[in-house]
Image (cartoon, rainbow, N blue to C red):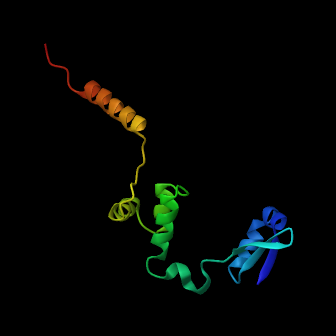
Amino acid sequence: MHAVSVSGLKHNPADALRQARNSPVVVLNRDHPDAVLIGLEQGGVLQAPGVRAALATALFRDGELSLARAARVAEMDVASFIVHLGRLGIPAIRLTAAESNADLDTLEQWLQSSSPTPAR
């Protein structure tokens, strides 16, 4: 097990992450344990069935990852990840009512401008 101070973590996060791949790293805040970094590759955690998808889903649902990035974490293409989200009842696209109305207005304008004009 390793220990790193908050300032040490701030100045050299790559070192703490490297250490966490091998064993837990305790983050000390003013000499008090505050957090533990654990490498997800330890013990094959990420290779267990469903772990990557569950992790990506939770991070997407909580707004921490974009749709495309979450799909990469889950090791899925975006379309498959959208289907996965749908099965769980998680919307792939989140819009407010105002954003939805603005999109509909844009679509209506585009449809009107792209419809053929009658020949005279």
Q: Where residue 116 sits: x, y (%)?
A: 20, 25
Q: Residue at x 34, y 62 (%)?
A: 83
Front in this rendered view, residue 88 or 67: 88
Query: Residue 74: x and y, percent?
Result: 47, 68
Say if residue 72 shows up in the picture. Answer: no
Q: Nearer the viewer, residue 62 or 78?
A: 62
Residue occupying image coordinates x 60% and y 77%: 40
The quadrant of the image that shows the N terminus is bottom right
Q: Position of residue 114 (x, y in %)?
A: 26, 28
> Quadrant of the image for the C terminus?
top left
Q: Nearer the viewer, residue 14 or 116?
A: 14
- For this orientation, the residue located farthest to the bottom is 43
The structure residue drawn at horizontal position 68% and vertical position 79%, both measured from the top left corner, is 21
In the image as oriented, which residue stretches furthest toward the top? 120
**Residue 103 appears in the picture as rendered:** yes
Direction front: furthest residue: 32
Query: Residue drawn at (83%, 67%), measured in percent from left and top?
Result: 8
Picture quadrant of residue 103: top left
| Residue 56 relative to residue 109: left or right | right
